[in-house]
Image (spheres, coloured by chain):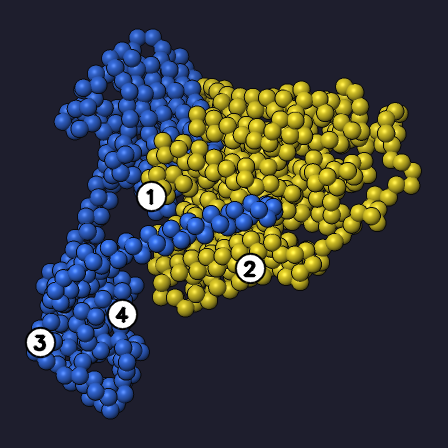
Chain colours: A yellow, B blue
Amino acid sequence: MNPGIGYTALILVSAITTIIGFYGLRVSRTTSDFYVASRTVKPWWNASAIGGEYLSAASFLGIAGLIAISGLDALWFPIGYTAGYLMLLFFVAAPLRRSGAYTIPDFAEARLESATARYVTSVLVVVVGWFYIVPQLHGAALTIRTTTGLPSWVGAGSVVVVVCLTVVTGGMRSITFVQAFQYWLKLTALAVPAIFILLMLSGTTGSGAAIPAGTELFPPSMPLSGDSTYSTLSLMVALLFGTLGLPHVLVRFYTNPDGAAARRTTLIVLGLLTIFYLFPTIYGVLGRVFLPDLAANGYPDATVLLLPGTLIGGLGGEILSALVVAGAFAAFLSTTSGLVVSLAGVISQDVLGGSVRGFRIAAVFAAVVPFGVAMVTDSLALAGSVGLVFAFTASTICPLLLLGIWWRGLTDAGAVAGMLAGGILCGSAIMLGAQTAADSVWRDLLTQPAAWTVPAAFFVTILVSKATAQRRSSSVSRFMTKLHVPERPLAVDNPRTQPN
Amino acid sequence: MPPSVPSDSTLLLITAVAVVIGAIAIVAVVGFRLSRSYRELGTEAEHATFAALHSAAAAGRQLRNGLEPAGALKASKQLRSLLNCAAFAMTDDSRLLAWDGSGAAAKQPESAVVMGLVAKALSNGRTQVATLEPALRASLGLPPDGELKAAVICPLKVDSRAVGCVVILSKTPTAGLVRATNEVAAWVSAQLELAELSSSRTLLAEAEVRALRAQISPHFIYNSLNAIASFINTDPQRARDLVVEFADFTRYSFRRHGDFTTLAEELRCIDRYLLLESARFGDRLQVSLQIAPEVLSTVIPFLSLQPLVENAVRHGIEAKVGSGLVQISARDLGAHTEVTIEDDGVGMDPEQLRQVLAGRQDGTHVGLRNVDARLRQVYGDDHGLTIDTGVGHGMLITMTVPKNQPGHDA
């Protein structure tokens, strides 16, 4: 591929992100347009922003790659990523918006009135965030390596640098609009080339490649479905429950004026994600036909990046390739910056005393550590890596959130015990799973641990809470009321009826 | 826990690093413990004193919130080890708060039974030594033929009023034990008085905040009504709109409930205020606004921004020749929300401003001092107003509040 494409796309996306971040709010208004309601973010915008932040490297590159390697099983990933939002909609979005807690540790402290529970939650949130950033950086490394031929660290490094610069200089002023822009950029970047490719394959544009007659999309030589029922089930548990605890997604809900708007936003997010996930699937299936070597060479995640250039030659192909690369970078930047901002909030609050300067230091810290981890590890499958992060989140933070919101009986001791139990079980299972032989009976249990670690975490949490019922926080009734009673709406402009 | 599926060698490397770090941590902790225990070597008597003081200090921390079950239980455990008795209980004036016992007395009895036992001590405020009859022992859940035959009951007094009791069970009530129990009860009483002191300090602080809660300025009412009056003949529709705005403004600022509001509601109030002021100033008053939507739901003290805007208009723009601009911005700083209010009016001498903020000078700008004092009271000294000004150079007021305020409901 022409290296110029990679450079152009990278520089363009970084520049646009920074510019919108800085100037998104610079449109000054006068008194005549003071109305606050016109300044609240409409659910549409906010939903786009959530979509922008949520659709990470795993969604953009990983799913198509996984379809290329393992066939239909990979379709469970988009289903899980999207359906997780249904859980969020039903159980978490509105109560959490009402709780007034800006981060999950804030929620833990307010609900359980315990500093220890807060610290444990903070540590877990930071660990989850870091390991969620790592696959993003792997994705960036892969993209740069594939499109420009530069070494891996350039891609990961440039994402870290852009994110640090914008966050540290306060450039994320209008972060909602930046993230919303990123969603539509990602969607366009996948949809436009996909539509061109489909048009071309269906023969309406005349020249170019066509699906060779008699090609099987799922040839017997490449596995159609290798996973057992257990691992599919376990993956679904991980994705459904893991979405609930993702730190960067929760913060977005504060941009909603009230709990009802939080629910409406979540509904729109479901729609936006559904549309988006159509396209990685198309790329994955076409990748199996036209780029079968990639999967064999160990770089299946590059399918999305290379497909447009391979199928459509000439200038058109280069433009479409540039679009896809730009979309991929939007994915890395938006998810990473969302995570870095929320991690920096947690770190600065708990370690650096919560000052504004502390936030900046924490932001750099939050971005550099995963960069280090990304440099010493190498990813085989982005979607799979992210799936493991979801499993870990589901086993640790999810019990705290669900039981904290819906069960009065949760105590600080129970929450801490549950989080530690889930974290240790899930963490060690993943560690061991990576070293287990492929034909071992334990392999499924260890590589997809969510199906047993999530219930275990819930079980420990409930059991210890029951045993320590006298530690129940005294203000639990008041806090529960706050969570579940609809709030007074934010100041709404309702013009009086004017007599004529 | 790397989520990626790293190659075996990197995984081994990470595991090895983790093991080494863990080993270093264990060695460090053990070494620290050992060095500490060597330093603490002393005579037996010193050890006993240290242990007693340690128990007392630990129990004192638990009683910092007054008589409540969770703290009382933890304190009871410490105090029982201090007195070395079979069971130690604490009550307030109506129920059993905590019971800590060992052996036969390990099970917590019914609250009513214990309250019956302490009724006399509560009413006359004097220490009682009771002999436990078999029937009473049974109702306390003790074996009827057991050795625990005596209870020492000491009232806890705050301001010479009995607010609860300390109960201990023992085989025989020796004079030493009774005296020790009395001392413990006196010490607990002192802790309770401290707790009451600290809660009244909190109440005082709250009362101060309430007293500082800004009042709508009389000048503003007078000026607004005059401005509205001037429109009644020339532009009745506008006059009507202004009266309605004025009514809404007063409803907000006279509201009784809550010391906190959201940034969005406060901005609505400022909007009404500026609408009324611009009826008076006309084109001389210009306003621009930059608000990040993410921070609209931030909780801020009630009427903490409006006085700042009023200050900008009344002391900045009004005294100035020609038109003036007030700029209001709110932005997201991660864990904080920063609100700035800037005017290009006449400004003021920083030294004079310092005097006003320190409360050494009355007169103009008391609104600023009031807001500054409330912010410091609520969020601590780090969160007072930051004001940049100079004579003839306008004024920039910056207010930074934390986004997460679990205790404050808007």
Residue B321 in percent (x, y) is at: 30, 8
The extreme top residue here reads: B322
Query: Residue flagged by tag 4: what amino acid is it?
Result: Ala
Residue B258 tag number: 1
- Helix, strand or loop at label 2? It is helix
Q: In which quarter of the image is the N terminus of chain A?
A: top right
In-front residue for pair A445/B239: A445
Query: Residue flagged by tag 2: what amino acid is it?
Result: Thr
Residue B176 tag number: 3
Residue A6 tag number: none
Give the label, 4 or 1, closer to the camera.
4
Circle 4 crowding by C-alpha within 10 Å: few under 14, some 14–19, many from 20: many
Above-or-below relation of A391 to A201: below
| Residue bearing mark 4 | B98
The extreme bottom residue here reads: B145
Residue sitting at x 14%, y 83%: B172
Residue A175 in the figure: left or right of residue B27: right
Does the CB distance between marks 3 and 4 fall below 8 Å?
no
Circle 2 crowding by C-alpha within 10 Å: few under 14, some 14–19, many from 20: many
- Helix, strand or loop at label 1? It is loop
Does the CB distance between marks 4 and 2 fall below 8 Å?
no
Q: From where the camera sits, is residue B259 visible?
A: yes
Residue B16 in percent (x, y) is at: 49, 50
